[in-house]
Image (cartoon, rainbow, N blue to C red):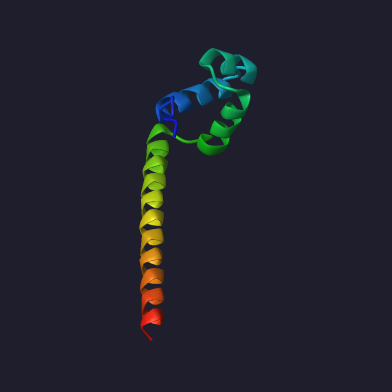
Amino acid sequence: MKRARFTEEQIIGVLREHEAGAKTADLARKHGVSEATLYNWKAKYGGMDVSEAKRLRQLEDENAKLKKLLAEQMLDAAALRELLVKKW
């Protein structure tokens, strides 16, 4: 998986430039991203502060870890059920 090139601070800085009146096409060219990326950032981080964006990242990471644990538990439970059915 490709690692993100921009930190939350940088993304919010770009969005602040956009809010200040810079054109989307100019910002995209300046920072080397597509206009669609800028709009995605705006949808995700729009109106956030840097600390809020970092907290969002932490929550997303924790959520991914918990989903992985749940999937592993469900797989283990299914394997045990299958084993019990075969025994009977």
| Corner quadrant of residue 42 | top right
Residue at the spot 36% in from the left edge and 43% down from the top edge: 58
Outermost residue, bottom direction? Answer: 88
Q: Is residue 74 above or below residue 83?
A: above
Question: Which image quadrant for residue 83?
Answer: bottom left
Q: Nearer the viewer, residue 15 or 6?
A: 6
Quarter where residue 57 is shown: top left
Q: How many marks?
A: 0
Residue at x-position 36% and y-position 49%: 62
Q: Is residue 28 left or right of residue 65?
A: right
| Residue at 53%, 17% in the rendered image | 32
Q: Is residue 65 left or right of residue 29?
A: left
Horizontal arrangement in the rendering, residue 40 relative to residue 50 (left or right):
right
Q: Position of residue 11 (x, y in %)?
A: 47, 27
Q: Is residue 71 above or below residue 77?
A: above
* Quadrant that contains the N terminus: top left
* Residue situated in front as seen by the camera: 33 or 39: 33
- Residue 84 image offset from top left, x and y in percent: 37, 80
- Residue 23: x percent and y percent? 63, 17
Q: Is residue 87 above or below residue 18?
A: below
The relative height of residue 48 versus residue 18 in the rendered view (above or below) is below
The image position of residue 37, as x and y in percent, is: 57, 28
Q: Which residue does the image show at 43% across and 25% down from the upper left?
A: 6
- The foreground one among 79 and 31 is 79
Indicate the quadrant containing the C terminus: top left, top right, bottom left or bottom right: bottom left
